[in-house]
Amino acid sequence: MKNMLFIMNPKAGRTTLKNSLVDVLEVFCNNDYAVRTYLTKSADDAERIVQEEGANYDVIVCAGGDGTLGNTVTGYMKSGIRVPLGYIPCGSTNDFARSMDIPRETVEAAEMIVKAEPFSIDIGSLNDKNFVYVAAFGMFSDTSYATPQNMKNIFGHAAYVLQGIKSLANVPSYKMKVTIDGDEQEGEFIFGMVSNSVSVGGFKSITRKGVEFDDGLFEGVLIRTMKTPADLERVVRALLTGDVNEKSMVSFRAHRVKFDAEDPVAWTCDGEFGGEYKETKIHIHRRAIDLLVVQESEQDEVIE
């Protein structure tokens, strides 16, 4: 009999797990797991329980949204454990699950976990914070979006937000120098994203092509401040078509990225507030977490 720590966020975006919890536990128990269920009580509770108890288990499964997953992974990174991790997506967006082809139905996700093998995935860090799939700043991600749910919609609606802008003068910009594996880009930017995902904000990411989850590389995009309506029209078209060669955009793959801004910039990590910094250092920890997934012989580059 194997020991499982089952971490569940009862306040995650969707309530389907509450309705199927007995069925999920039955899947685990029928596959020779002795399950200890832990319900999180605060935003950083998963991190704490992983650090305190994670090493005592053969497997850890977390059920919740992207924030719950990110907090669980932070516990892994701080404790240094290599216990295999399973994920049951129960949030409102579930970008990471979409990227990894993890079923949205909770019982199906549990059935996948008991059949899966560990797959080592990359994890990012932003200064002293960890993130699983995306760190972003700018008009689609900053704290001017008043509610937590709105903060989760980092990039997916970007083209439609831009399309609705009445005046480019009202778009906030950030003057900074961005160092991408030693290559410098200077200027004013309205948005920046560093990710390891084919889906961001519930929509296909512009950097989705060629994403590998264990190659030690981020995919990133910067959008420069636009001067004319023609610039705006081109960027909207680029976002809708996935054209990363638009001249107002900088796309890249990198191990390390450093942002030096004149003023503090607000960041989100996996859709949650990640702090405000003038200097932001992002780097990737290659194959840092052993995620339980069923690997396909060939993965589609685009999530339907």
Image (cartoon, helix red, strand yellow):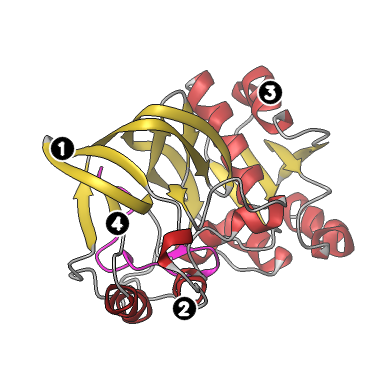
Q: Tell me which label, 4 or 3, sits earlier in the chain.
A: 3
Residue at 48% in and 33% down: 130
Asked if residue 42 lies left or right of residue 142, the reply is: right
Q: Nearer the viewer, mark 4 or mark 3?
A: 4
Point out residue 198 in the picture as x, y percentages from the top left corner.
40, 65
Reply yes or no: does residue 14 show up in magenta.
Answer: no
Number of the label disc, if any, that sits on residue 221: 4
- The answer to which of marks 2 and 3 sits earlier in the sequence is 3
Region rendered in magenta: 199-217
Q: Secondary structure at mark 3?
A: helix
Disc 1 and disc 4 in contact, CB within 8 angstroms: no
In the structure shown, which secondary structural element does the residue marked by tag 2 occupy? helix
Residue 139, position as x, y percentages in the image? 48, 55
Residue 76 rendering spot, x and y as whole percentages? 53, 28
Question: Is residue 136 positioned above or below 223 on the image?
Answer: above
Q: Which residue is mark 3?
A: 48
The residue under label 1 is 181
**Secondary structure mainly formed by the magenta segment:** loop
Q: Is residue 78 visible?
A: yes
In this view, the residue in front, 64 or 199, is: 199
Answer with mark 1 or mark 4, whichever residue precedes in sequence: 1
Q: Amino acid at mark 4?
A: Val
Q: Nearer the viewer, residue 133 or 226?
A: 226
Q: Which residue is mark 2?
A: 163
Residues at marks 4 and 3, CA–CA distance in whole angstroms? 33 Å
Q: Nearer the viewer, residue 25 or 176?
A: 176
| Mark 2 / mark 4, whichever is N-terminal | 2
**Nearest to viewer (mark 2 / mark 3):** 2
- Which amino acid lies under the numbered mark 3 shown in the image of this protein? Arg
